[in-house]
Image: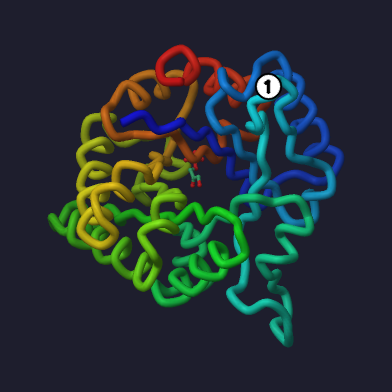
Amino acid sequence: MSRKPIIAGNWKMNLLQSDAKALYEGISSFVSNYSAVQLPSVVIAPVFTCLNQVKEIPCDCGCNGTKLAVAAQNCHWESSGAYTGEISVEMAKDAGCSYIIIGHSERRQYFSETDEMINKKAKAILAGGLIPIICCGESLEQRESGITDSWIASQIRAALDGISSEDVAKSVIAYEPIWAIGTGKSCDATEANRVIKMIRGVVADVAGQSAADSIRILYGGSVKPSTIEEQMAQSDIDGALIGGASLKADSFNEIIEKTMKVAV
Ligand code: 13P
């Protein structure tokens, strides 16, 4: 089963418009050297106020692919209304996004996002024709108390509840152990692969084997140019969701380049 890898940069709450423009230019000039067939699916997720500084780059080789796609870092599930501070799926699409990250541990932790909210967001994103990047992950305490697998499985079951197999197949999951985010301490690649395989098993259970074979499941947490090759060499890791190392064109481009060598 060959799944096209995804290299996604989550810029989190960083960069002003001029910095975002410069970073976008550094990445876009790199991906322009290749066709979408050679590249992984490259995705960048700037803050909302910088979405006007970046844009999707369609491939020009006739393959109908995309060299660079844009993601929003969050959305609301309602289409419009009195929800101060929120943006809808349609608004993200209007701003050029084709992916939306949901359920990031930082949103679960600091903004009290629940599994139920994440499920509503996933449904709204798919109904709007965009692709959700659904994040999951355990804390250090959960890992040390041996409940990693049951915790992650319950996050995934809740996020995918009531979504058709066809829509699950198009979705993306990112396994991001909380203790590996921003710490410089990446999860061991074989352990990340084991958890991702377990997640794929949960997807097979809720949406069938064909959806499980198609869905792309990424690893996130201190991914760097020095870790990506081992991560991409694993059987079930389909790419990476990258924070810190996506904020510099050099390191992000190096991750893309190494992914092309190992996995595309
Ligand atoms: P770091 O790559 O900075 O650890 O962040 C990972 C992450 O949270 C991406 O969403």
Q: Secondary structure at mark 1?
A: helix
Please tell me whether residue 21 is drawn above or below residue 142 in the rendered image.
Answer: above
Q: Position of residue 247 (x, y in %)?
A: 65, 34
Q: Position of residue 195 (x, y in %)?
A: 23, 44
Q: Is residue 217 left or right of residue 203?
A: right
Please tell me whether residue 22 is drawn above or below residue 210 in the rendered image.
Answer: above
Q: Quadrant of residue 249?
A: top right
Please tell me whether residue 115 is drawn above or below residue 147 in the rendered image.
Answer: below
Q: Position of residue 88 (x, y in %)?
A: 68, 70
Q: Is residue 263 left or right of residue 107?
A: left
Q: Amino acid at mark 1?
A: Val
**Which residue is the site of mark 1?**
31
Which residue is drawn at the image coordinates 71% and 60% (left, top)? Answer: 92
The answer to which of 98 and 137 lies nearer the viewer is 98
The answer to which of 179 and 158 lies nearer the viewer is 158
Which residue is drawn at the image coordinates 65% and 50% (left, top)? Answer: 98
Q: Is residue 180 left or right of residue 201?
A: right
The image quadrant where one finds the N terminus is: top left
Q: Residues within 10 Å of mark 1 (few under 14, many from 20)?
A: many
Q: Quadrant of residue 17?
A: top right
Any atom of ligand 1 within 8 Å of the CB at mark 1? Answer: no
Q: Position of residue 121 (x, y in %)?
A: 52, 69
Which residue is drawn at the image coordinates 32% and 61% (left, top)? Answer: 156
Which residue is drawn at the image coordinates 78% and 50% (left, top)? Answer: 51
The answer to which of 183 and 20 lies nearer the viewer is 20
Q: Residue furthest bottom?
A: 82
